[in-house]
Image (cartoon, helix red, strand yellow):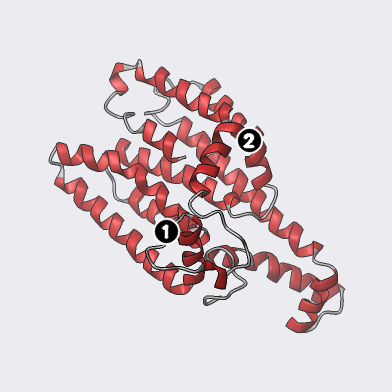
Amino acid sequence: LKDLKTVYYGPIFSMLAIPAVVIDFGEKVFFDGVRTAIDYKNFLLWDWGGVVWKLRLEAVLFGFFGLLGLYRLLYSASVNPLQRFLPVFAGTLLLALNFYYFEYASFWKHWALIIPILIWQIYFLIRFIESGFKSRYLFYSSGLFFISFGVSYLSVLFQVMWAPLIYDRYKKHDYVTLKKIFYYILSLFVSIAVIVAWHPRAFWRITGLVGSDVFDSNQSIYTAEKSSTGLSFIYYGLLILKNHIALVAFAILGFFHLKRQSSLLKTIWFLPFLLVDA
């Protein structure tokens, strides 16, 4: 997988597909007379349905993983201080019935992995605050970042969710917590360095798509796609507004509902940033 031209996204995305490929290869060995990797490759040229449904099964599992993360997030003390079940059920059901989430959880697309991981990272951020800044939640989030960045380099943008907490801890001179977050950020840079060194082609492709020509990146040598340079963020922003307006409205209404709870003002101030981030 080292910098292969055929690997469109990050290398972790390809690695996560290996279990489905191994299982499908074993099935073909036992039932279809396949004996070598070349035989298996030739078999896939005319019938690749077997490995596809196994990959989609993995996507379904990640989809349930994301729903579980949202369920726990909505049951957290900061988001749901009265521990009411109805908002938790409604929020989880709303995500499950969302057309794009259902699509991603049914096909092997990179968002099938990125969205569940993002949900769990938000949950770990909330638990980090609620637990009195225990380091283990930073460790969990760092591990998830390595996976998500290894799937899509755009995952680094989601880490903006930590900015309000850093600012708040700095204002309160909580240097012990800031030190923990510093080591967390350092771990992110290590993950970035490892993944980019492992598969730089996807990195240069992304920098071209978002309009960055600082490195004089000519992504045409890495992919045959014709990109709309500089328009990808606008495209995804409009996609959210047009197709996810129900989720956006739910998040906004949920925020203003929580804002009325004066006892929560010190713990839910970061929620607008999570909304923009998501």
Residue that carries the numbered disc 2 in the rendered image: 96
Point out residue 116 in the picture as x, y percentages from the top left corner. 53, 46
Residue that carries the numbered disc 1 in the rendered image: 212
Left or right? Give the position of 65 relative to 105.
left
* Dot 2 crowding, Cα within 10 Å, few <14, some 14–19, many 20+: some
Q: Nearer the viewer, residue 122 or 7?
A: 7
Q: Residue at x 59, y 74 (%)?
A: 5
Q: Nearer the viewer, residue 99 or 208?
A: 208
Left or right? Give the position of 158 relative to 96.
left
Quarter residue 216 falls in: bottom left
Label 2 sits on a secondary structure element that is helix
Q: How many marks?
A: 2
Point out residue 136 in the picture as x, y percentages from the top left corner. 33, 51
Q: Residue at x 49, y 69 (%)?
A: 218
Quarter residue 24 falls in: bottom right
Quarter residue 246 falls in: top right
Label 1 sits on a secondary structure element that is loop
Point out residue 203 in the picture as x, y percentages from the top left corner. 47, 65
- Sequence order check: which comes first, mark 1 or mark 2? 2
Type of the residue with mark 2:
Ala
As displayed, is residue 25 above or below residue 57?
below
Left or right? Give the position of 266 relative to 124.
left
Q: Residue at x 72, y 68 (%)?
A: 23
Type of the residue with mark 1:
Ser
Q: Quadrant of the N terminus?
A: bottom right
Farthest left residue in view: 173
As displayed, is residue 111 above or below residue 165?
below
As displayed, is residue 96 above or below residue 222?
above
